[in-house]
Amino acid sequence: MTRQEYMRYLKPKALLALIAGYLVWSLCFVLLYSLLSVGCEAGWHQSRLLGINLLSWLLVGTWLLHVGAGVWLVREAGRREPELSSQSGHFIQRVTLLLHVTALAAMVWIGLPILGLPPCA
């Protein structure tokens, strides 16, 4: 890789694209646990909407929004052609896709208890 090619990957946009999946995962993690704490303290789990408590609706909605963002990132990373046609460009593209897939799996994993466990138990 030449110095000019290397410098392309040090641009903030390229670095942000590399870690975007885990940024979405961390936002999902913080929001889910914050909503759970605030919702339990505020009593949102006592109100019901369509037979399900309001806090569960908020948690599922937040989780699905972030999972949707993760799916979009994976799809875009899979479609995008490497900026550079060199071997390193293909490597960076594959690493980006792998990072987004693992972040999506982590988002699904941290949200699964929402579907099966009552909040504030």
Image (spheres, rainbow, N blue to C red):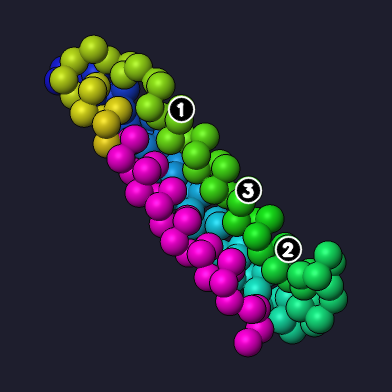
Task: Please say whether residue 4 is visible from this viewpoint.
Answer: no
Tell me whether circle 3 and circle 2 mark residues in contact (CB < 8 Å).
Answer: no
* Comparing labels 3 and 2, the label whose residue is closer to the camera: 2
Dot 1 corresponds to which residue?
A: 76
| Quadrant of the rendered image containing residue 45 | bottom right
Q: Say whether residue 2 is magenta.
A: no
Q: What residue type is labelled 3?
A: Leu
Dot 3 corresponds to which residue?
A: 65
- The x, y position of residue 102, in whole percent, is 35, 49
- The x, y position of residue 42, in whole percent, is 79, 80
**Within 10 angstroms of label 1, few (less than 14), some, or many (20 or more) residues?**
few
Spatial separation of the CA atoms under disc 3 and disc 2:
12 Å
Residue at x 31% of width, y 19% of height: 82
- The x, y position of residue 35, in whole percent, is 67, 69
Residue at x 33% of width, y 35% of height: 96
Q: Say whether residue 113 is magenta.
A: yes
